[in-house]
Image: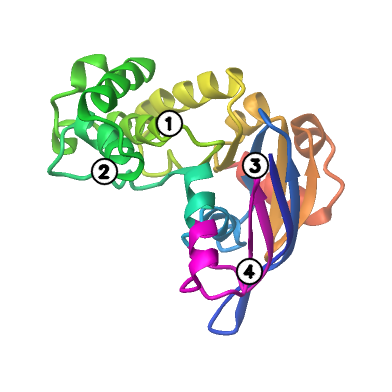
């Protein structure tokens, strides 16, 4: 489902991603862990084409883009748009439209991007609100919802575009512990249903319980990769051991 080859990204000559290689099967849940500033979120943003890589190749499904090519090019722009449609994104800060209701936030993407009729898009939106446990919140605006409810609407919005992959960028870090549980419950359900997902998180228990594979990022590289029982039970890399010792003893 996902193939990443030699992904490189720098900001003002400061390297952030230093040649990332990654392969992921359909239905696999991969969790990225690592210290702040190690490149995890930038990796997701490159996959979704919110950032243009300096070099490397990204393939999601049957769509590939090459890093280092200007997005103004007609064919490259078309490929970037196609790739973005393959990879839905759920952000740390929800990014809902404040002037739209929960239902409208979900329906607007299929209507504007895919040309779906309003009635069909709203019917889909109601189904997805029910899926995330918010069927009675359709007419509410984001300001009337808790943070956990807003994030669940954001997940429903990503699902509405029927992407091949959903990327979660620290989806619970802005929430208090009780609200984090609401969002993690929905994410667990999606993982159990076989959704292909990549999750950047500091929720180590979620990584232990739901990841098929855990990647430890350090200084723009994948320092270690393996199943949760290996990464958390018997890490091979010294930096992985140091990081886990710090985050599990807080």
User: Is 178 within the magenta?
Assistant: no
Check disc 4 and report its element: helix, strand or loop: loop
Location of mark 1 (residue): 159
How far apart are the two marked residues, 4 and 3, measured between alpha carbons? Answer: 17 Å
Closer-to-camera residue (178/188): 188
- Tell me which label, 2 or 1, sits earlier in the chain: 2
How far apart are the two marked residues, 3 and 1, measured between alpha carbons? Answer: 17 Å
User: Is 54 within the magenta?
Assistant: yes
Q: Badge 4: few (under 14), some or many (20 or more) residues near its Cα, within 10 Å?
A: many
| Dot 2 and dot 1 residues touching (CB under 8 Å) | no
Q: Badge 1: few (under 14), some or many (20 or more) residues near its Cα, within 10 Å?
A: many
Location of mark 4 (residue): 67
- Tell me which label, 1 or 4, sits earlier in the chain: 4
- Tell me which label, 4 or 3, sits earlier in the chain: 3
Image quarter (top left, top right, bottom left or bottom right) of the N terminus: top right
Stretch in magenta: 51-80
The x, y position of residue 93, in whole percent, is 34, 48
Q: Badge 3: few (under 14), some or many (20 or more) residues near its Cα, within 10 Å?
A: some
- Front of the two marks 3 and 1: 3
- Tell me which label, 4 or 2, sits earlier in the chain: 4
Check disc 3 and report its element: helix, strand or loop: loop
How far apart are the two marked residues, 4 and 2, measured between alpha carbons? Answer: 29 Å
Location of mark 2 (residue): 96
């Amino acid at each position: 489902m996902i193939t990443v080859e030699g992904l490189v990204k720098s900001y003002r000559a400061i390297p952030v991603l230093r040649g990332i290689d990654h392969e992921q099967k359909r239905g696999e849940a991969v969790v990225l862990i690592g210290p702040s500033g190690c490149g995890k979120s930038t990796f997701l943003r490159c996959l979704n084409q919110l950032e243009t890589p300096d070099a490397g190749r990204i393939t999601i499904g049957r769509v590939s883009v090459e890093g280092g090519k200007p997005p103004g090019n007609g064919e490259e722009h078309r490929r970037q748009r196609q790739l973005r449609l393959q990879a839905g994104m759920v952000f740390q800060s929800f990014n809902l439209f404040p002037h739209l209701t929960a239902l409208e936030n979900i329906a607007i993407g299929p209507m504007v991007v895919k040309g779906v009729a309003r009635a069909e898009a709203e019917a889909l939106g109601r189904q997805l609100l029910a899926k995330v446990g918010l069927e009675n919140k359709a007419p509410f605006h984001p300001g009337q919802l808790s943070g956990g409810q807003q994030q669940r609407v954001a997940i429903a919005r990503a699902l509405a575009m029927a992407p091949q992959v959903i990327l979660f960028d620290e989806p619970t870090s802005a929430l208090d512990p009780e609200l984090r549980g609401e969002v993690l419950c929905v994410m667990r359900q999606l993982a159990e249903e076989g959704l292909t997902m990549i999750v950047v998180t500091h929720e180590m228990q979620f990584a232990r319980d739901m990841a098929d594979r855990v990647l430890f990022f350090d200084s723009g590289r994948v320092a270690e990769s393996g199943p949760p029982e290996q990464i958390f039970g018997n890490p091979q890399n010294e930096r992985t051991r140091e990081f886990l010792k710090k985050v599990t003893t807080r």
